Image: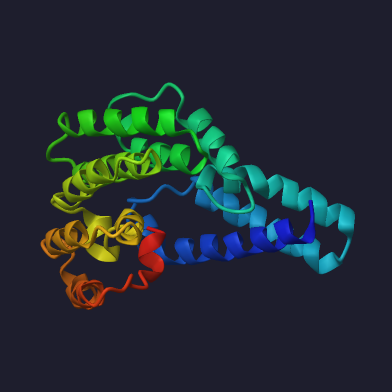
Amino acid sequence: MGDDDINASQKSCRVIQMTLNARERMRASGDVPGDDDFTAGALACARLNEAISTSDPSKIESAARAVRPILSRLGMAPSSPREQLAALEEETSGLSGRDLFYQLAELAKRAFNAGETGKAGVYSKQLLQMAHQYPRDWNHGNAVFYGNFVLGRIAIQQGSVKQAGQYLLAAGATEGSPQLDSFGPNMTLAKELLEKGHSQVVLEYFALCQKFWENGRPKLDEWSSAVLGGEVPDFGPNLEY
């Protein structure tokens, strides 16, 4: 394992620690498990940092190898997209019902990122089908958004730009969710459509997002002005969520 992988592992470890810090109140109330991959990752990261402090290459290598499978399950570097997909598929094997419903969006996204568009399409369609079974679940809005979002990205990749625009609007028609309401929607598909000259559908998407992303309305207005001016906005972290 090279220096680049170790540096990437350390960067992911900092994200894990920040996530754990942000979840302390929820963990105290019992809403977040104390034995999940973030907890295991924090312990493995601590061992990696300790090994790095010794400057012993063999200890560093061993600790870095130990943390990598956990980072794969969490979808973090330096694990590859294929490693991340394989790890989540193994972890979710045999799940059904609501437990599977909660994992399908991540499975669809990871499959797409790994170049497995066939799997990504299957997971996305299954996610949208299951959304009908759980109309009042907190995850329903995420399912509507990400199911259509991934199908739209597949359509773009296959050259079906008009269909991709339809999926974008279907994603924007979500009622929102705790995550979407707070951090806002992913703008990758919107960016891809803008780069192909389809600005009108993106402006319609922004208008739909106004309905659930109230805190993001100033940002949506700013992006709309940029698009009307013929520019592709800088979407920042909204290309990551």
Does any portion of residue 98 appear in the rendered image? no
Q: Front-most of 202 and 60? A: 202
- Residue 172 rendering spot, x and y as whole percentages: 18, 53
- Residue 211 rendering spot, x and y as whole percentages: 10, 62
- Residue 30 rendering spot, x and y as whole percentages: 34, 51
- Compared to residue 68, the image places residue 179 above or below, namely below
Q: Front-most of 122 and 175? A: 122
- Compared to residue 20, the image places residue 224 above or below, namely below
- Compared to residue 102, the image places residue 126 above or below, namely above
Q: Determine whether, in the image, residue 41 is placed left or right of residue 194.
A: right
Identify the image quadrant of residue 50. bottom right
Instruction: Give the residue displayed 63% in from the left and 54% down from the top.
Output: 43
- Residue 8 rendering spot, x and y as whole percentages: 65, 60
Q: Front-most of 66 and 216? A: 216
Q: Determine whether, in the image, residue 15 is placed left or right of residue 95.
A: right
Specify the color scheme: rainbow
Instruction: Give the residue displayed 16% in from the left and 29% down from the top.
Output: 133
Does any portion of residue 15 appear in the rendered image? yes
Q: How many marks?
A: 0
Q: Front-most of 23 and 60? A: 60
- Compared to residue 37, the image places residue 229 above or below, namely below
Instruction: Give the residue displayed 52% in from the left and 48% down from the top.
Output: 75
Quadrant housing the C terminus: bottom left
